[in-house]
């Protein structure tokens, strides 16, 4: 017997969201291109990082290409959050990300997302024109929630168990989706109390952040349960070890696996997909969207 699975697609009215000065319609899929400005970024080997000015030039070459390929967002990060990564000073983070945000805002029509957990960087990035705060620590650092609230920008709260140094040392959950759902209930409540209304919040289950391979696979399979909370869902799986482990592929050979999981996440209701390979992901999601919208 055939069974049908239905995934919830929000209505047009529900799904418009203002990112700085740009409205985006979240009934459609959007691609967020990753622009890491870190010397040790896990998947691009820190290729953007030589000197400060070379770094800015290289970041802009990558940013322009990603926008031409259809990115709606560019995510600019100055702290590596790969497993085992070292921490970075506030000044280093500011020096890395602010010039890139300013340069993108001066020349490209795209929403700039700042990937940071640091209050001073949140404030400075908003002044420089960022339209989204993407925090892998879900505004858990002291002062981050207040700084984000003051910007009046949307925030993406990501789930992580532990911290980047130790998060892959035996992560444990009662129920991966259930535990993450409860975590978001609490964070969304804290945000509301701290001045960030629910209509400015996106959530992200944090693939690879304190999760085993099985956790990551289950999370993707059951992503619709997080989507059903009614908040826009962002996901990032591009080039991550969950793809490498299943396919036994090094980081630069994970594109096809990444496209498969991006489409699966979109089909389950995720609306923003954070990736390194923008062009192929845009095409895959446009195709999936056409199928999802067909009557
Ligand atoms: C910064 N960063 C690295 N991986 C990420 C992911 O999966 N989601 C979000 N929101 N940010 C991420």
Image (cartoon, grey):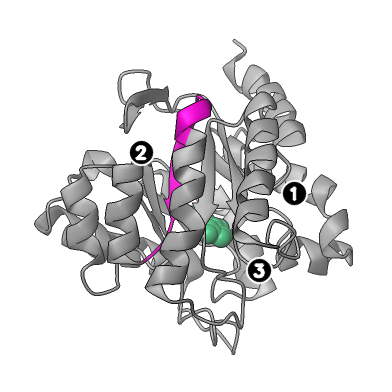
Q: Residues within 10 Å of mark 3 (few under 14, many from 20)?
A: some
Q: Residues within 10 Å of mark 1 (few under 14, many from 20)?
A: many
Residue shown at the point (36%, 23%) measured from the top left: 23
User: Relative to 41, is 227 above or below?
Assistant: above
Helix, strand or loop status at disc 3: loop
Q: Earlier in the sequence, mark 3 or mark 2?
A: 3
Taking 43 as reference, is 205 left or right?
left
What kind of element bears circle 1? helix
Report which residue position mark 1 lands on: 258
Residue 79's label in the rendered image is none
- The furthest residue to the top: 295
The residue drawn where x is 49% and y is 69% is 176
- Where is residue 152 drawn, in percent x and y? 20, 42
Residue 76, percent from left and from top? 52, 51
Query: How many numbered marks are there?
Result: 3
Residue 116 sits in quarter: bottom left
- Please name the residue that numbered disc 2 is placed on: 129
The quadrant of the rendering that contains the N terminus is: top right
Viewer-proximal residue among 1 and 95: 95
Q: Are marks 2 and 1 in contact (CB under 8 Å)?
A: no
Q: Where are the magenta residues, as a range?
A: 105-117
Q: Nearer the viewer, mark 2 or mark 1?
A: 2
């Amino acid at each position: 017997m055939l069974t049908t699975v239905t995934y919830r697609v929000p209505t047009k009215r529900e799904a418009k969201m203002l990112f700085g000065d740009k409205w985006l319609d979240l009934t459609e899929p959007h691609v967020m291109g990753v622009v890491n400005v870190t010397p040790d970024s896990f998947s691009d080997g820190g290729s953007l990082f030589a000197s400060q000015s070379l770094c800015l030039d290289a970041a802009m070459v990558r940013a322009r290409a990603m926008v031409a390929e259809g990115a709606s967002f560019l995510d600019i990060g100055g702290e590596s959050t790969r497993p085992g990564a070292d921490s970075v000073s506030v000044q280093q983070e500011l020096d890395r990300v602010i010039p890139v945000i300013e340069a993108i805002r001066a020349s490209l029509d795209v929403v700039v997302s700042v990937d940071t957990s640091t209050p001073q960087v949140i404030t400075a990035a908003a002044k420089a024109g960022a339209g989204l705060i993407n925090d892998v620590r879900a505004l858990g650092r002291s002062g981050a929630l207040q700084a984000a609230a003051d910007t009046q920008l949307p925030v993406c709260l990501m789930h992580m168990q532990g911290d980047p140094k130790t998060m892959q040392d035996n992560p444990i959950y009662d129920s991966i989706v259930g535990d993450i759902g409860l975590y978001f209930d609490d964070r969304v409540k804290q945000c509301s109390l701290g001045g960030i209304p629910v209509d400015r919040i996106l959530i992200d289950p944090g693939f690879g952040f304190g999760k085993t391979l099985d956790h990551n696979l289950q999370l993707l399979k059951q992503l619709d349960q997080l989507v059903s909370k009614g908040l826009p869902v962002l996901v990032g799986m591009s080039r991550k070890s969950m793809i490498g482990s299943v396919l036994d592929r090094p980081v630069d050979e994970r594109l096809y696996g990444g496209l498969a999981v991006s489409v699966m996440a979109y089909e389950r209701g995720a609306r923003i997909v954070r990736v390194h390979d923008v062009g192929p992901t845009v095409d895959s999601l446009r195709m999936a969207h056409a199928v999802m919208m067909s009557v």
